[in-house]
Image (spheres, rainbow, N blue to C red):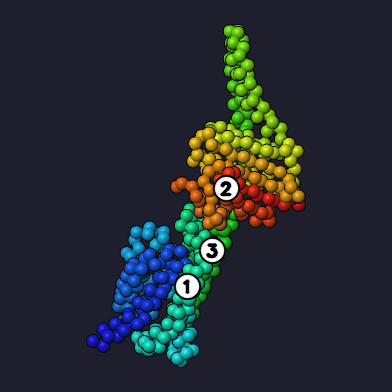
Amino acid sequence: MDFLLIYFKSVVLLSIPQALIHIWLTFTIWGLKPMLHVRKLVLFAVVNSLLVDLDLFHASVAFHALYSTCINFFVVYFVFRNFGLRKIWIVYLTNLALLLLVEMLCVPLLQWGYGLTTQDVVSKGYLLQRASGYAVVGLILISLFRLLEKRKISFFLRLYQYLMNIKQTRTREILLLALFQVFLLGLLFIIGFENKQRYADSTFNMIIYALVLLTFGAFFYTIRLLLNIREEAVRQTQDVYVEEIGKMFTTIRGQRHDFLNHVQVMSSMLKMNKLEQLRSYMEEIAKEAHSVSAVFSHSSPAVAAFIQAKTEIAITRNIAFTYQIPDNLDIGSSIKSIDLVKIMGNLVDNAYDESETLPADQRLVHLSLRVNDGMLEIEVRNQGRLLSEQDKQLILLPGYTTKRAGHSGLGLAIVNERIQFYKGLLNIESTEENGTTIIVALPQR
């Protein structure tokens, strides 16, 4: 009976309120509107507390930490199973991080306030003292999520969109390594509880050394992954550059290959005295040849290749692509051609994708390059859906996209990264009259 009474008091006075505050704050942080999920939040707090506290008085601190971590995941999965696995992991890991943070705050608070030892804090006694300590931290957390609800801090919303849409394998590896390092730190914290009573000094030191080595190994592997990501980004940029030039020369070779066919057709029309049809046919050929020669003669081979490739793509996708680029445009030595192609390519590709949602006669994409007050300005305009103010903030985040499924949402994030590298500016406008216009300004040094 004494065990059941202590168990009941621990669950009702301590565990359920604590679990409810943690999960409520988790939902508030990620903008998941906890008021719409009150029943599920209460159900989670009750079930999780009942199951976790069953083992509280019979096992070591380390085993209980492992046990409660597993129970926490299964209860989150059971209660919020309709959320999808990725959202479940976000909720679970955030809730776990809050739990670890609260424990690390409460232990020194109880030691300082009541003179309790570490073993007293994790024991079955001193229930009222522990409840009062957790209540203080709980009030701080409640004030925090009230502040988050009022401010609606965009950072967490952007981070949530990124985590929900992340597709890069290496980025996932980095996040997992970061979580692994946090786990190691938590394990160090837990082992410290039982050091004097369960481990000899030499054994404890060996465990600490092993965990420190694992932490350093995870850190250096993270650095290696970051370097690999940088190298992959360079390779992808070079691939885009080579692809655009290849498309241009493919077009030129195709026109040369077709030249004999065109001559034969024109000769036949002339023999049959079909002069009007011959004039129309020659005008079409001249127009196509002029578009290639005009672009190919541009002062920047990279821009020439890009324009020609995008023109051909626009024709196949039934998009009216226009451009305004001075023949003597001075890009400047401070801006790499590869980066210029990367920025223009992502902007134009996004504009093409959005234009395809419209009827064929409304598909219009315009590209403009100009130099203004020492800044190279790249402007891309297209018709399509209007962007809300929230979209304008989130659209630069990796993984966020306003387009249909199958798009990575990385285009504008790549553009924004290059803009920041060159210390440039980005402006996004979206109106019913002019559609969506994105202007990038890069300083010419």
Marks 3/2: CA–CA distance: 26 Å
Q: Residues within 10 Å of mark 2 (few under 14, many from 20)?
A: some
Residue receiving disc 3: 155
Q: Are marks 2 and 1 in contact (CB under 8 Å)?
A: no
The local secondary structure at tag 1 comes to helix
- The dot on residue 431 is 2
Residue receiving disc 1: 146
Using the image, determine if residue 112 lies above or below residue 377.
below
Q: In the image, residue 325 lies at what x, y percent?
A: 69, 38
Q: Is residue 161 visible?
A: yes
**Which residue is drawn at the image coordinates 72% and 52% (left, top)?**
443
Disc 3 versus disc 1: nearer the observer: 1
* Residue 277 relative to residue 14: left or right: right
The local secondary structure at tag 3 comes to helix
Q: Quick one: quadrant of the N terminus?
A: bottom left
**Which residue is drawn at the image coordinates 58% and 44% (left, top)?**
433
Q: Amino acid at mark 3?
A: Phe
**Which residue is drawn at the image coordinates 36% and 68% (left, top)?**
38
Q: Nearer the viewer, residue 82 or 143?
A: 143
The local secondary structure at tag 2 comes to strand
**Which residue is drawn at the image coordinates 64% and 53% (left, top)?**
426
Marks 3/1: CA–CA distance: 16 Å
